[in-house]
Amino acid sequence: MATHRKPKHHPLAGSTARTAATLALAGAATATALEGTGHAAPAPTPAQAKAQVARYYQQAEVATEQYNGVKERSDRARSVLAGLQDEAARKTERLNAARNALGSFAAAQYRGGSMPTSMRLLLSTSPDRFLENASLADRAGQGQAAAISRVRRELLDVQRVRTTAEARLAEIRREESALAAHKRTIDAKLDRARQLLSELPAEEATAIRTDSGTGVAKAADTAKASVATGSEAVGEVAGAVSGRAVPGRAGRAVAFAYSALGKPYEWGATGPSAFDCSGLTQAAWQAAGVSLPRTTYTQINAGRRVSRDRLAPGDLVFFYSGISHVGLYVGDGKMIHAPHPGAPVRVAPVDEMPFAGATRPA
């Protein structure tokens, strides 16, 4: 019996397989479409967009203050390096002078020869003169020893200074690497904020960028107009918002802050044409004759801490848990600060951001 049989044909098999495959593909396409629909985030509301942009700005400001701190250290290191380079040049000159003196001794010794003293005494036509010359040679030998000692000392000094300078240069290179990293972070956060704003209607984007209340803006305009008159009366200038005079150094710092109203925010800037937040407070108190550190997290330790209910005009007010923002208190619950890119120096309520502490520099 033949064992090779033609397999039975099932007319539904091919159709069923094709149908199943078609359904599978259709299901996959549907699932893909649904998946894409499910992951497409809806456009943010103005409030959501404002909150997200504020987060990007705040994160950029954290990186900005870190950048400011690193740059301050880098600038100090460069100043020290310049001093070390000058010192190394001076010590190298002294080393060369010592070497020249030692060379003179060596040349004199070569010209005098190396004949033993006893033989030169026997051959000398004038023993008395020879003994006199021998005494001078002994003193010259002592001078040569001193010259050698000086060369060694100057050489060690040059090596020490150069080693210190090399260490400082390595520190600067590390700081420059950190600066570049912080700059990339700042740029990335600001780019995200700009991208988000570009996706909003122009009117909403502008409102978020400026983000200033009508009452506060009006008070700021009044204060700025007072400063524009050139009045030297600090009390009048400071009273534009607070309604009372501010005496002494605090008054001069407050007056400076009012004079900066309307100037743009620029990260890393300390004036006179633009400021970041700590750059503004540093410049304001510098105008009052008080030197403040460069960053928010160092400024908070530069002075006496004060509680929120004891704030006085001129106090520094700090915000966020990482102490990443600072303003200058001007009274009546308001401050002058440099908010973020796109928002110029302005008057704002102290309670518009999470309060972290306050310091009185003077």
Image (spheres, helix red, strand yellow):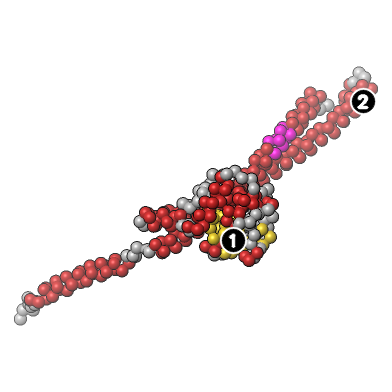
Residue 286 point in image, percent of width and height: 64, 48
Residue drawn at x 71%, y 33% as measured from the top left: 93
Q: Residue furthest bottom?
A: 1
- Give the residue number, with chain letter if any, for mark 2: 131
Q: Main secondary structure of the magenta part?
A: helix
Q: Check if residue 139 falls in the magenta segment.
A: no
Q: CA distance from mark 2 to mark 1?
A: 96 Å
- Within 10 Å of the Cα at label 2, are there few (<14), some (14-19), or many (20+) other Cα atoms? some
Instruction: Find residue 153 and report its horizontal and vertical position in percent.
Output: 76, 40
Return the residue nearer the eye: 87 or 223. 223
For residue 181, side relative to residue 151 (left or right): left
Outermost residue, top direction?
A: 125
Q: Quadrant of residue 358?
A: bottom right
Left or right: 143, with 198 as reference point = right
Residue at 52%, 62% (x, y): give it.
352
Residue 282 falls left or right of residue 267: right
From the image, tell me which residue sits under label 1: 332
Q: Secondary structure at mark 2?
A: helix
How far across and how far down the image is residue 88, in percent?
A: 68, 38
Camera-side residue of 268 and 90:
268
Instruction: Find the magenta span and give its range.
Output: 87-96
Can the viewer see residue 305?
yes
The amino acid type found where label 2 is placed reads: Leu
